[in-house]
Amino acid sequence: MMDGKYQTAAAIVTAVEIETLAVHRLYSGWEKVIFPRDSQEYYMTSFSRGRLVTAQQKVMGMTAAALLCAKVIGAFRPRYLIMCGIAAGIGEGIGQIYGDILVPDVVWDYSTGKFVGHDEAEIRFGDLGFLPRPASIALDESVLSIIRSIQGKSDNEFQVHIGPMACGTSVVANHEFVNRRVLSLFSSTIGLDMEAYGVAYAAVNYSSPSPTPIIIKGICDYADEEKSDQYQKFAAYNSCQFAKYLLEKHLPLD
């Protein structure tokens, strides 16, 4: 039961088609929703605990994510705003494998900062130096507590990693870049994507009642030179299935 402030149980937003297909496979009965003067397509269905909405960004990135989420919140007023999909993990060295779930407790934008001369910064790229000014958003602790509490439960088949997630404007396929630009700032970072910060920003800055943002990403690569698309479908599937598990069994909707 919804408490009157919210109109739908949850909205799941995605960045690319492979993620959207995984969301649509969660339930049947999806119906397209179109609003006048809005070119965005939304889809809605019902599950055992309420109504569920999904929509896909037109392009990748934080700007598109923030805009889509603002539109979704305004139109559907979801209790939870969930981003499902794929992301890069940091590597097997911290116990990660393909298909594991990343749930950030903090999302931070590593692309913000100032480019300066080579000798003016510790982070250097050729003749350029970079002075980072990362912005960060802490995610809801009550949701994170729930996720921590179900680690190891007999009906939880997912391996979940909780920690900071780095968000930037470009696809990363270079381990040296990860070390210099990401891990040098937040050494406990568990993964990278291109949208999470925009999703969280839209959710926490929207007018009341604003939704609780949850980022759920499946590891499809390690942002290094061996990056490929081989595990994207598997990672997207796991991400969406974990979201379903949370929605149906653990997230409060009263």
Image (cartoon, rainbow, N blue to C red):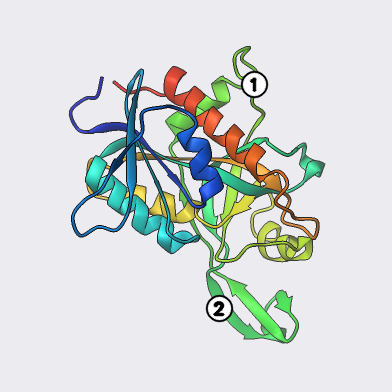
Taking the image as shown, residue 210 lies to the left or right of residue 5, namely: right
Relative to 10, is 61 above or below? below
Image coordinates of residue 176 in percent, x first then y, are 78, 64
Q: Earlier in the sequence, mark 1 or mark 2?
A: 2
Residue furthest top in the image: 154
Does the image show residue 27?
Answer: yes
* Residue 7 or residue 120, whichever sits in front: 7
Image coordinates of residue 46 in percent, x first then y, are 33, 26
Residue type for callout 1: Glu
At x 57%, y 26%, the residue is 148
Relative to 150, is 199 above or below? below
SS of the residue at dot 2? strand
Does the image show residue 189?
Answer: no
Taking the image as shown, residue 209 lies to the left or right of residue 187, namely: left
Label 2 CA crowd tier, 10 Å (few <14, some 14–19, many 20+): few
- The answer to which quarter of the image holds residue 214 is top left
* Label at residue 114: 2
Image coordinates of residue 198 in percent, x first then y, are 43, 56
- Give the position of the C terminus as an image quadrant: top left
At x 75%, y 55%, the residue is 227
- Give the position of the N terminus as an image quadrant: top left
Image coordinates of residue 30 in percent, x first then y, are 36, 33
* Label at residue 157: 1
Query: In front of the other: label 1 or label 2?
Result: 1
Taking the image as shown, residue 182 lies to the left or right of residue 7, namely: right
